[in-house]
Image: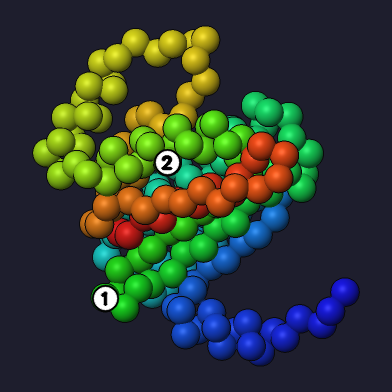
Amino acid sequence: MENIDLFAMRERFNNQQIMLCFNGPISRSLIEEIGNALRNYLSAEHAHPSAAMDVFAVYIEMTQNISHYTRARQWNEQEAGATVVVSRNQGGRYVVSAGNLIEMPDGENLLQAVEGLAGMDKAELKAAYKEQLRRPRDEARPSGAGLGLIDIARKSSEPLQASLQPLAGGRGFFSLRAVI
């Protein structure tokens, strides 16, 4: 194993204004602990209360979606890993990004859903949210790309961005980025 240059990593994190970064297997308790750390960090930074709530809510939604997806597939710890980053952009807005392994067909569907939401304005997102709330839940259909994703899009100050990197074995790495 090669040595990790922690100073270079620290400098890169500082330059990119990364406040929180996690990479590895994610569990409910870990989501909660990282969430508490994020909440404390935002409080210490004197983030506006509504922005802090939105950042926290988006972090929770993204990480829980990853946890539910990988648990439903009964993937092992390595397959069930997540990469989560909370940072600031040059405009001072918070950026919440998360990524995980995903089956390619699921990733393509999710990418299409994100692209559809990214093309909507605030009024259209509100209407889509209300429509999704009224829609009966189909227990036979796996959840995903539904109410939570629309809620993330509604909390975002910019259109959601997503990417899907194809990998071997019919899987890919899906990444989602929300600016709060």
Write down the quadrant of residue 93 in the picture. Answer: bottom left
Q: Is residue 18 above or below residue 81?
A: below
Which residue does the image show at 56% across and 88% down from the upper left? Answer: 11
Task: Label 1, secondary structure: give it.
Answer: loop
Which residue does the image show at 60% across and 56% down from the upper left? Answer: 83
Q: Write down the residue under mark 1.
A: 91
The residue lying toward the viewer, choosing from 115 and 86, is 115
Is 96 on the left-hand or right-hand side of 103? Answer: left
Is 125 on the left-hand or right-hand side of 19? Answer: left
**Residue type for callout 2:** Leu
Q: Write down the residue under mark 2.
A: 111
**Residue type for callout 1:** Gly
Q: Position of residue 57 (x, y in %)?
A: 39, 47
Q: Position of residue 123 (x, y in %)?
A: 11, 39
The residue lying toward the viewer, choosing from 119 and 86, is 119
Quadrant containing the N terminus in the rendered view: bottom right
Residue 29 visible in the shown view? no
The residue lying toward the viewer, choosing from 118 and 85, is 118
Quadrant containing the C terminus in the rendered view: bottom left
Give the class, few, some or many, for how many residues have Cα within 10 Å of label 2's Cα (few <14, many ≥20).
many
Which residue does the image show at 84% across and 79% down from the upper left? Answer: 2
Is 102 on the left-hand or right-hand side of 97? Answer: right
Q: Position of residue 82 (x, y in %)?
A: 62, 51
Task: Label 2, secondary structure: give it.
Answer: helix
Total number of numbered discs in the rendering: 2
Disc number for residue 74: none
Write down the quadrant of residue 51 in the picture. Answer: bottom left
Q: Is residue 44 above or below residue 142?
A: below
Write down the quadrant of residue 110 in the picture. Answer: top left
Alpha carbons under labels 1 and 2: distance apart: 26 Å
